[in-house]
Image (tube, rainbow, N blue to C red):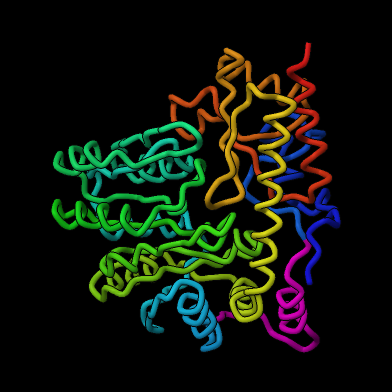
């Protein structure tokens, strides 16, 4: 039903992915496969809902989420993940990183240790440090073939050492693992044993590739704090609308108080878009996931054939490839320069996700396949000769 092949002209629209490259990479003429944002036409129901709300003789004053907004999220959680929640469990918040910061402000104190799993989304480091908390690293362990695992012995050792909270990336960005129910149950058990607050970033939870099934953290731990959004699923990050899912009333009160103190409210059109997405977007999300799966398979196959020293695997979730270039024996800076200056592409540097990952780059496959093919060909060409 939906078209993911038609190019979308995003230059000149104040788009970070395209118009922000000059600031991020020092060049504006690169092919962008960096920031996790998709170059697809939006779900028509979202565009129509915004157009209707912005019609003639409409006011744009202070806004409160309507019942339809809450109902759409509850239905989405129930029908997609079998998760039964109540209206009270939902707290709107402008963004997921904002939500992580609010959670730490509400549930931890300055100096507290916060557990994270490198390689991991850079704001995990920045948010923890910026709020005066201490990041405690428990690196993921690679078993090869794209199989990254939580190190449960190390997790327990770090928790026993006195961390206060655990920021879990689920699904994991950038390695693409979708944690199983068994893994999440073990995490939850450790958190309960050592009094560690589990906070789960589930922004990529709808993006399952190749038939993988997502297990929400709340399905195994009702006292966790979960954060989600339609932004990655429907590629509407600019509309600034995410939400907490918090069944635990005591936790919810603390976080709600922090949201009120900081006056963190969602954008009017973000609320409209979220309701439209969750009400009408199931088929679109299904087709987009199928397209992203084929994009990831295409990219992995292309690299295996044309650049076998760059090792990548199809992720279980997210539309992000975590590519290992260690066979080329380049420093992180040399690798970055090879890709930007010789290939003319913008990828995320592995060192952004942890100091030990200089041989990795993150590539976003959420683009029309013709554009992806052009970028992959440029990458392969940069390593010839």
Expressed as whole percent of the image width and height from the top left, the position of residue 49 reads 72, 80
Residue in the image at 78% along x and 59% along y: 4
Query: Along the horizontal axis of the image, is 45 left or right of 272?
Result: right
Instruction: Using the image as rendered, state which of residue 103 and residue 343 is in the foreground.
Output: 343
Quadrant location of the C terminus?
top right
The reply to whether the magenta stretch includes residue 205 is no
Is 49 inside the magenta-drawn segment?
A: yes
Against 335, is 253 above or below? below
Q: Position of residue 187 (x, y in %)?
A: 27, 52
Compared across the picture, whether 364 is left or right of 160 comes to right
Above or below 308: residue 217 = below
Magenta stretch bounds: 41-63
The total number of labels drawn is: 0
Foreground residue among 361 and 30: 361
Residue in the image at 37% along x and 67% along y: 261
Residue sitting nearer the eye, 14 or 32 = 32
Q: In the picture provided, is 58 more to the left or to the right than 277?
A: right
Please identify the quadrant where the N terminus is shown.
bottom right
Where residue 338 appears, as percent x and y from the top left, is 70, 19
Q: Quadrant of residue 111?
A: top left
Q: Is residue 331 above or below residue 52?
A: above
Q: Residue at x 29, y 65 (%)?
A: 220
Q: Residue at x 50, y 34 (%)?
A: 145
Closer-to-camera residue (356/114): 356
Location of residue 8 in the rendering, given as x and y in whole percent from the top left corner: 83, 55
């Amino acid at each position: 039903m939906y078209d993911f092949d038609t190019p979308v002209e995003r230059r000149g629209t104040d788009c970070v992915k395209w118009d922000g490259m000059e600031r991020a990479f020092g060049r504006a003429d690169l092919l962008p496969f960096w920031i996790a944002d998709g170059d697809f036409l939006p779900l028509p129901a979202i565009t129509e809902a915004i157009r209707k709300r912005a019609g003639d003789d409409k006011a744009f004053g202070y806004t409160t989420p309507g019942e339809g907004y809450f109902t759409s999220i509850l239905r989405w959680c129930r029908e997609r993940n079998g998760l039964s929640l109540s209206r009270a469990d939902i707290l709107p918040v402008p963004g997921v990183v904002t939500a992580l910061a609010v959670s730490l402000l509400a549930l931890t104190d300055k100096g507290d240790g916060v557990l994270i799993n490198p390689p991991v989304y850079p704001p995990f480091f920045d948010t923890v440090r910026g709020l005066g908390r201490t990041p405690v690293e428990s690196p993921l362990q690679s078993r090869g073939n794209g199989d990254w695992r939580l190190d449960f012995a190390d997790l327990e050792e770090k928790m026993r050492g006195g961390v206060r909270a655990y920021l879990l990336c689920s699904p994991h960005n950038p390695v693409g693992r979708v944690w199983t129910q068994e893994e999440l149950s073990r995490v939850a058990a450790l958190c309960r044993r050592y009094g560690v607050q589990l906070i789960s970033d589930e922004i990529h939870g709808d993006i399952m590739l190749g038939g993988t099934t997502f297990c929400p953290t709340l399905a195994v731990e009702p006292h966790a704090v979960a954060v989600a959004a339609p932004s990655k699923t429907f590629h509407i990050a600019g509309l600034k609308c995410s939400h907490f899912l918090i069944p635990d009333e005591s936790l919810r009160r603390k976080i709600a108080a922090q949201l009120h103190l900081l006056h963190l409210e969602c954008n009017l059109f973000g609320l409209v878009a979220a309701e439209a997405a969750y009400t009408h977007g199931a088929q679109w999300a299904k087709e987009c996931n199928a397209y992203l799966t084929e994009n990831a398979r295409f990219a992995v196959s292309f690299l295996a054939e044309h650049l076998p020293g760059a090792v990548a695997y199809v992720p279980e979730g997210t539309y992000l490839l975590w590519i290992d270039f260690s066979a080329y024996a380049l420093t992180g800076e040399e690798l970055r320069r090879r890709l930007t200056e010789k290939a003319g592409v913008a990828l995320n540097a592995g060192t952004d996700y942890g100091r030990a990952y200089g041989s990795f780059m993150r590539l976003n496959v959420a683009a029309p396949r013709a554009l992806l093919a052009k970028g992959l060909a440029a990458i392969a060409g940069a390593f010839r000769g």
